[in-house]
Image (tube, rainbow, N blue to C red):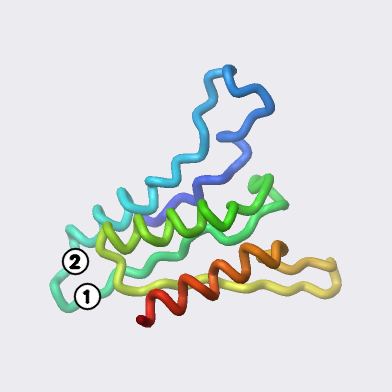
């Protein structure tokens, strides 16, 4: 079982009262806790929170606060490893995360993890 990225088009809508639920950031905790419950004590559970968006089924990046929440919820759920990935594709003029604020938040969270 892996983390399902919470900010996907099926969870977003322009009309808040259309019955579509908002992104479920708490999935970071729930999935990690489930995985950890099946691991031996000497095994690690890595969290790869959503730090991208703006293409395919991902209409936007998470906000820095959403990234922070996913990260801390994963740690609370028992994650012992953390991976944010950066993706550059010069041919398509693509850089993920695209937001300097989101990239800066990922750096802050990595420092917090190390501390």
Would residue 100 appear left or right of 105 to someone viewing this image? Answer: right
Q: Residue furthest bottom?
A: 114
Percent from the top left, x then y, of residue 100? 70, 67
Mark 1, residues whose alpha carbon is within 10 Å: few (<14), some, or many (≥20)? few
Measure how far apart labels 1 and 2 are at the Cα level. Answer: 6 Å
Q: Are marks 1 and 2 in contact (CB under 8 Å)?
A: yes
| Residue at the image position 78 percent from the left and 66 percent from the top | 94
Would residue 12 appear left or right of 74 to someone viewing this image? Answer: right
Q: Identify the residue position indicated by label 2 in the image.
A: 39
| Residue at the image position 70 percent from the left and 49 percent from the top | 56
| Residue at the image position 66 percent from the left and 54 percent from the top | 53
Q: Quick one: 102 or 87, which is closer to the camera? A: 102
Q: Quick one: 46 or 16, which is closer to the camera? A: 16
Describe the element under mark 2 as helix, strand or loop.
Answer: loop
Would residue 73 appear left or right of 111 to someone viewing this image? Answer: left
| Residue at the image position 43 percent from the left and 54 percent from the top | 69
Percent from the top left, x then y, of residue 68? 47, 59
Q: Identify the residue position indicated by label 1 in the image.
A: 43
């Amino acid at each position: 079982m892996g983390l399902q990225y919470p900010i996907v088009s099926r969870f977003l809508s322009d009309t808040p009262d259309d019955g579509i639920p908002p992104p479920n950031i708490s999935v970071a905790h729930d999935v990690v806790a489930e995985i950890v419950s099946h691991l031996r004590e000497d095994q690690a559970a890595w969290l790869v929170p959503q730090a991208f968006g703006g293409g395919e089924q991902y209409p936007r990046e998470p906000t820095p606060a959403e990234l922070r929440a996913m990260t801390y919820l994963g740690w609370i759920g028992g994650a012992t490893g953390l991976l944010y990935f950066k993706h550059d594709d010069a041919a398509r003029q693509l850089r993920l995360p695209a937001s300097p604020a989101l990239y800066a938040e990922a750096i802050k969270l990595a420092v917090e993890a190390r501390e």
